[in-house]
Image: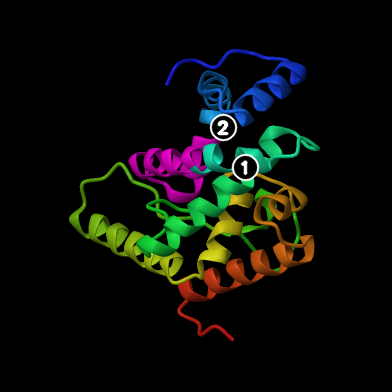
Amino acid sequence: MADAVEITPEAERALVQRAQSGDEDAFGTLMRNHYEPVFRLVNSMLRDEHGARDVCQEIWLTVWKNIGSFRGDAKFSTWLHPIATRRAIDQLRARKRWFSRFIPFASDTGDEGGTADRVAAAPEAADTSDPRQDLERRESSARFERAIAALPPKHRAVLALREIQNLSYDEIAANLGIARGTVMSRLFHARRQLAQKLGDQPCE
């Protein structure tokens, strides 16, 4: 993928109009300028670079097929990112697994705050060759991955957008096409269920 070039909003609108008329070169310029942000969004949800690249190809095919529906009453990225988010969620549902590393999660206060709310962390690699500690660490990591995998995809998606992408509740709502209150509810339940699963406590 060639490097992005900085373009003005006016120039981008012109590129969109040309792409809507079937100009592949104009579409290619749009793609170059938005590819990396889209890739970072998808990869933050999948935690799999190769898989994220494949999903990005599907996203851009979808964008090319549907660019005629973009009305231009918002930024191109505002229209593009929900498409990417939905495609990543579809991929999560299909592959039935989630992160290979820890997502920090907050307590069940439901606050929008950051690190002060986080109540657990995944086991980090220790500088030790103790076989017993290595085994415990692997077992703990596997337990965490099973807990994440057991969450519904819609809850995992909200966790990724909040904890990895650091999006606000309003931004998550826009990406997923749901109400802000629904975002708050899903995030609360995802964090609660994750904490309960890691604590061997049955979810209500």
Q: Position of residue 109 (x, y in %)?
A: 73, 67
Q: Which residues are magenta?
A: 37-61
**Circle 1 Cα neighbour tier, 10 Å, few/some/many (<14 / 14–19 / ≥20):** many
Tag shown at residue 81? 1
Mark carried by residue 37:
2
Q: Residue at x 63, y 31 (%)?
A: 20
Residue 39 lies in the magenta stretch:
yes
Q: Main secondary structure of the magenta part?
A: helix
In the displayed structure image, the side of residue 187 where residue 22 appears, left or right: left
CB within 8 Å, label 1 to label 2: yes
**Figure quadrant of residue 73:** top right
* Image position of 183 (left or right of 61): right
Residue at point 51% right, 65% down? 153
User: Is 31 inside the magenta-drawn segment?
Assistant: no
Q: Amino acid at mark 2?
A: Pro
Q: Position of residue 121 (x, y in %)?
A: 50, 55
